[in-house]
Amino acid sequence: MARLAVLASGSGTNFQAIAERIEADGRHELACLICDKPGAYVIERAFKLGFPAFLVSYKGRDRATAEAVIYERLDEVRAVFIALAGFMRILSPELTRAWKGRMVNVHPALLPKYPGTHAIERSFESGDSELGITIHWVDEGMDTGEIILQKPMARIPGMSLEAAEAGIHALEHRWYPEVITDLLDRLPRPRTKRSQGATSA
C-alpha cells in the first residue's frame, strides 16, 4: 500500500476524482492534500471527503521557506508519491529532483504544445483539430517532463470554449486517477524486517 499526497491550488475537481478512485480501490491511501492558496475550495472538498488538508501559504515567504514546510508535511504523513492537480506554483529544481520518478502532473493540452497557464484557451484559440490532456512526470522545466499518457479529443464544428473545457476536464477526471493508481501499483514494495534478514526477538 502506497501513500499519495496531492498538491492543488483551485477548486479541486481533479483532487476529488483522485480521492474517490483511491478510496474505491482500497489498494493505496491518500495521505493528504497540500494547498498553497487560502480559501481554495479544494480544502473544503478534502475535509468533506475526510482527508487531511494542509495550507502552506507562500505569502510573505520565499519559495525555499514554503517548500521546507511542504517537505515537513510530506514527511509527517509518510507520503511516497505526489500528484499535482492544478498546483499553481513552480517547484524548485531541488524539490523536483528529490521526487524524480515519484511526482506526476496533468496538463490540459497536448504537450509539447501550449505549456504553462491558460492552456485550454490557447489550444482552443489555435484552431487545432484536436484538443486533449497530457499526463507527465514532473521535472525541472515547465511541463517538459516525460509523457506518460496523452488523450486527444476531436474538436467538433461549432464547439464553444465552455464545451471544450468540459470535455477536457472529463478526460482529466477519467484518466488521471487511473494513471496514478497504476503508478502506485508499480512502486517497489517496502522491504520487511524478515526480508532484510532481521530476526525476531
Image: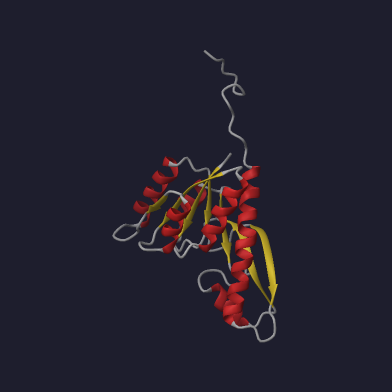
- Which of the 4 image quarters holds residue 73? top left
User: Residue farthest to the left?
Assistant: 60
Residue at 33% from the left image edge and 57% from the top image edge? 62
Does the image show residue 134? yes
Q: 181 or 123, which is in the foreground?
A: 181
Residue 30 pos. (x, y %)? 52, 47
Relative horizontal placement of residue 143, taking residue 50 as reference (left or right): right
Residue at 31% from the left image edge and 57% from the top image edge? 61
Residue at 47% from the left image edge and 55% from the top image edge? 7
Relative horizontal placement of residue 19, taking residue 37 as reference (left or right): right
User: Residue farthest to the top?
Assistant: 201
Residue 36 pos. (x, y %)? 39, 59
Compared with residue 152, is residue 30 higher up or lower down, i.e. above or below? above
Q: 63 or 170, which is in the foreground?
A: 170
Residue at 47% from the left image edge and 40% from the top image edge? 78
Does the image show residue 104? no
Residue 151 pos. (x, y %)? 68, 65
- Which of the 4 image quarters holds residue 177? bottom right
Question: Where, quadrant-wise, is the N terminus in this rendering?
Answer: top right
- Which of the 4 image quarters holds residue 114? bottom right
Residue 158 pos. (x, y %)? 66, 87
Q: How many marks?
A: 0
Q: How is the image coloured?
A: secondary structure
